[in-house]
């Protein structure tokens, strides 16, 4: 009787390990996606906070999102391959000097990352704060 089941445990192990490794790879991909998204959220928040307490400088705010620094070194590379076109910086309602609703706004959109065998485009990230400058 024993000779009929010689390869059974090998087949069961291969099937179980295949499913297990597929789950692990999927978890790692989702974890990386969440890491990238949360890092971009934090960089957008940091950038809008910087813009709220400093004189409005769109390039410096974009640099904070792209490089993590308002004045990056020449050798710095953008985070996760972002481009300036992915980061929009504005200060709506700030044209009128007497307007107290002056806000600084940062929008990150159009970024993508590979998820398993395809590319996934992330959602739009927006951050906004009122300007603290008079």
Image: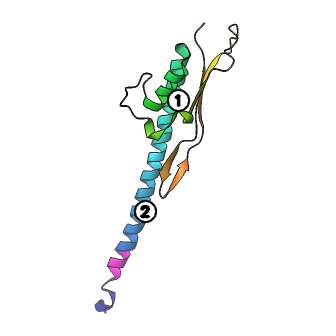
Dividing the picture into quadrants, the one containing residue 98 is top right
Dividing the picture into quadrants, the one containing residue 126 is top right
State the residue at coordinates (48%, 58%): 117
Tell me if label 2 and label 1 are in contact, CB under 8 Å: no
Residue 86 vertical position relative to residue 54 in the rendered view, above or below? below
State the residue at coordinates (45%, 56%): 26
Foreground pick, 14 / 92? 92
State the residue at coordinates (54%, 18%): 57
Dividing the picture into quadrants, the one containing residue 74 is top left
Q: Quadrant of the C terminus?
A: top right
Q: Which residue is mark 2?
A: 22
Q: Earlier in the sequence, mark 2 or mark 1?
A: 2
Q: Quadrant of the N terminus?
A: bottom left
Foreground pick, 65 / 126? 65
Image location of residue 56, percent across then percent down:
56, 16
Numbered disc 2: secondary structure: helix
Residue 127 in the magenta stretch? The answer is no
Q: Which residue is mark 1?
A: 44
Image location of residue 25, percent across then percent down:
41, 57
Image location of residue 65, percent across then percent down:
49, 30
Alpha carbon distance from label 2 to label 1: 33 Å
Foreground pick, 92 / 100? 92
Q: Is residue 55 left or right of residue 101?
A: left
> Of all residues shown, which one is farthest toward the front?
74
Q: Residues within 10 Å of mark 1 (few under 14, many from 20)?
A: many
Q: Which residues are magenta?
A: 6-12
Numbered disc 1: secondary structure: helix
Of tags 2 and 1, the one toward the viewer is 1
């Amino acid at each position: 009787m024993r000779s009929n089941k010689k390869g059974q445990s090998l087949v069961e192990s291969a099937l179980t390990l295949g499913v297990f490794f597929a789950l692990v790879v999927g978890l790692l991909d989702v974890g990386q996606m969440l890491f990238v998204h949360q890092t971009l959220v934090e960089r957008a928040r940091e950038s809008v906070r910087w813009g709220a307490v400093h004189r409005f400088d769109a390039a410096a705010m974009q640099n904070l999102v792209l490089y993590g620094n308002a004045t990056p070194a020449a050798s710095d590379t953008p985070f996760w391959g972002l481009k300036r076109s992915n980061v929009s910086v504005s200060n709506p309602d700030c044209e009128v000097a007497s307007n107290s609703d002056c806000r600084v706004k940062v929008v990150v959109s159009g970024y993508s990352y590979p998820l398993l065998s395809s590319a996934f485009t992330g959602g739009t990230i927006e951050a906004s704060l009122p300007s603290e400058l008079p």
